[in-house]
Image: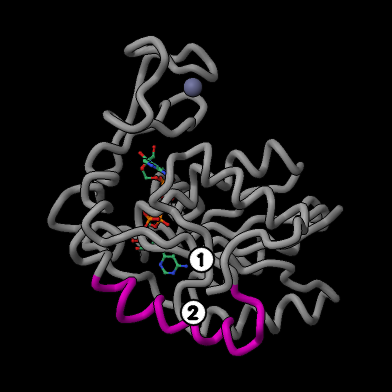
Amino acid sequence: MAVNIVLLGPPGAGKGTQAKRLQDQFGLIQLSTGDMLRAAVAAGTPVGVKAKAIMAAGQLVPDEIVIGVIADRIAQPDARNGFILDGFPRTVPQAEALDKMLAQKGLRLDHVIEMKVDDGALVERISGRFACKKCGAGYHDRFQPPKRAGVCDNCGGTEFVRRADDNAETVKKRLDEYHAKTAPILPYYRAKGALKAVDGMAEIDAVTASLSAILRGAAGAGVRA
Ligand code: ADP
Ligand code: ADP
Ligand code: ZN
């Protein structure tokens, strides 16, 4: 079943955590523009050179750059089996560009799901976030520590990384960007009748259960936004 979904929500809402779980559970691929941009920065590509300082400042990378990145990725054959967009679209022009590129390929979005989390919870989520250096598995100091301290549950790796932009000052800027530029895409999808929402304040497993129910098309799944 090739379903295409968008996970929407502020920084730290749990999009990446849940996208990885849905990827494994439903055989979809996670397309994270944040991960793609960080890879471009690390590799020093032209996109990375343009994005680096903008990301460090907690601002949004210009639409034309991000739209180009996602268009290239969706054009790859594995995207035909269904994808989870994590962190894209983030502006109304990005949402419009996505609709256009999917229509050209005869594809559509099956579910646009908002993960609702209070601003007050996001700073703690982001400041405690870290990931395995080797496999990228995500953790949290308090909410999702590795089962054995210092050892990745997934691959046994012992080195971990924290994102340069996951600091209190940048987080505030990222939340401002979310409210000013990303939240307006909620009415865009609501008007199309495509928007659903889950309670992102719940425990990680409970959020996964709500999302899975929506993907399986279970009656009454999710709450109407
Ligand atoms: P996003 O991709 O939306 O920015 P992440 O999935 O990276 O968010 O989650 C941010 C941090 O919060 C991570 O450290 C993750 O382990 C933790 N986290 C994710 N979901 C929850 C949850 N439901 N409750 C508590 N902590 C969570
Ligand atoms: P988070 O979910 O914690 O906000 P992401 O990894 O999704 O983090 O994004 C990190 C940064 O990458 C953003 O602050 C922004 O600078 C850039 N970025 C990612 N996706 C987009 C996008 N769709 N449009 C513009 N900038 C983006
Ligand atoms: Zn690992």
Judge the density around disc 1: few (<14), some (14-19), many (≥20) Cα neighbours within 10 Å: many
Amino acid bearing label 2: Leu
Ligand 2 in which quarter = bottom left
Residue 76 shown left or right of residue 8 in the figure: right
Judge the density around disc 2: few (<14), some (14-19), many (≥20) Cα neighbours within 10 Å: many
Residue 26 spot, x, y in % from top left? 75, 43
Instruction: State the residue in front, 135 or 197.
Output: 197
Q: Looking at the picture, does residue 95 appear above or below residue 70?
A: below
At 36% from the left edge and 66% from the top edge, which residue is drawn? Answer: 50
At 86% from the left edge and 53% from the top edge, which residue is drawn? Answer: 1
Assign a secondary structure to mark 2. Answer: helix
Q: Is residue 190 magenta?
A: yes
Number of labelled discs?
Answer: 2
Q: Residue furthest front?
A: 220
The residue singled out by tag 2 in the image is 186
Dominant secondary structure of the residues highlighted in magenta in the image: helix
Residue 77 spot, x, y in % from top left? 81, 54
Amino acid bearing label 1: Glu
The residue singled out by tag 1 in the image is 114
Residue 93 spot, x, y in % from top left? 51, 86
Instruction: State the residue in front, 4 or 72.
Output: 4
Residue 58 spot, x, y in % from top left? 25, 63
Find the magenta span and give its range: 176-195
* C-beta proximity under 8 Å, tags 1 and 2: yes
Assign a secondary structure to mark 1. Answer: strand
